[in-house]
Image: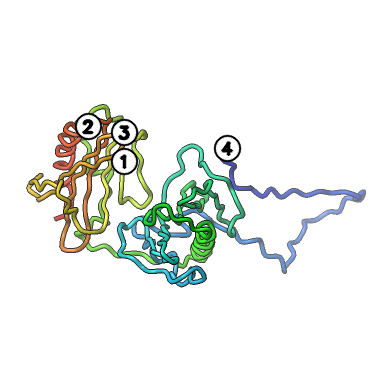
Amino acid sequence: MGWSRWAVLIVGFLVSGCTTQVGGAALPDPAYAPPKRVSSTSTDLLGTANTLDPCSLLDPAALSQFGTPQQTEQESYDYCWLKLPLGSTTVAVRFGLLERVRGELRAKEIEPVGALRVFEENPAKDRCARYILFSDNVTMIVSADTYESPGASVPQLCSITEKTTTTIAENVAARKVTHFTFPASSLGRVDPCKVVTVALAQVPGLPTGEVISYPGQHQCRWGLAMVPSLTVRFVLGTPATAPEVRQETIAGRQTGVYPVNVAGRSVCVAELKHGTGRELAQVLVRLPAGNTEAACAALRIVAAEAWTKLPA
């Protein structure tokens, strides 16, 4: 799908049936008011993406026709999610993540909401997703899934996504959003793309020039392919406590290091609790399968540089 530019209104004057030239200048109609230009960039409608509170995009009551949504503890400054119990099944409604469009958006365009274009992915049995597209080629994803209820069938899944997307788009168009005020020591103020520079070379085969930055600036990724790749992100939660988590001291800070079993690749994670709240700094290194030791070795070097650049 090629990207079309926003329509540009070209005003022309068509003259017909006039045979007599009249001197003087035309006077504007005093009652005429030029149409207001509707801006639909992410910055104009959302403000500063870095401080956007994604949970302010949707009042859970907007989904009450489907059930009683339950607000959850936020997992990230980048997105928000709700639990929607439907009988014995739980639907997770996720929204707010902003991404820059790279190449082709693999989704079909559907009816817009005001000046905002909306796209829909081909639905799967356990997930429906839509994208709100801003005119500066930034998308906001909205989805509903049953990942927490494997094998469940929910006929309303796409209806939930449709209602959520439309409501959020209307709120965004009306600028009904709020923003965080991060304290000086918060990770919310830190651009993860800037905390690793020298250590990038320690990840085997990593194409360091391939950088994916996010408008919210709470995560950054090097490497467009799944492997090799490196991600630095700041999330919200509690540190992992599984048996495979090994507590180490990296750059003078207690860090949990652990492998993650993912088919076809070796993934190693370093996790640091920051401050007294729920903020966590995470580094993830992904290499081809069978390279867990190498992934964790590179991870320690990357984390050592990253931790030194975090606020005290």
Residue 251 falls in which quadrant of the image? Answer: top left
Q: Residues within 10 Å of mark 3 (few under 14, many from 20)?
A: few
Q: CA distance from mark 4 to mark 1?
A: 25 Å
Q: Nearer the viewer, mark 4 or mark 2?
A: 2
Residue position marked by numbered label 4 in the rendering: 2
Q: CA distance from mark 3 to mark 2?
A: 18 Å
Residue position marked by numbered label 3 in the rendering: 264
Taking depth in this image into account, of 224 and 261 the one nearest to the observer is 261
- In the visual, does 138 lie left or right of 301? right
Vertical order, 84 against 16 (above or below):
below
Residue position marked by numbered label 2 in the rendering: 203
Q: Residue at x 52, y 50 (%)?
A: 135
Mark 1 lies on a secondary structure that is strand
- First along the sequence among labels 4 and 2: 4
Mark 3 lies on a secondary structure that is loop
Q: Residues within 10 Å of mark 2 (few under 14, many from 20)?
A: many
Dot 4 amino acid type: Gly
Q: Quadrant of the C terminus?
A: bottom left
Q: Which of the numbered marks, if any, corresponds to residue 221?
A: 1
Q: CA distance from mark 2 to mark 1?
A: 13 Å
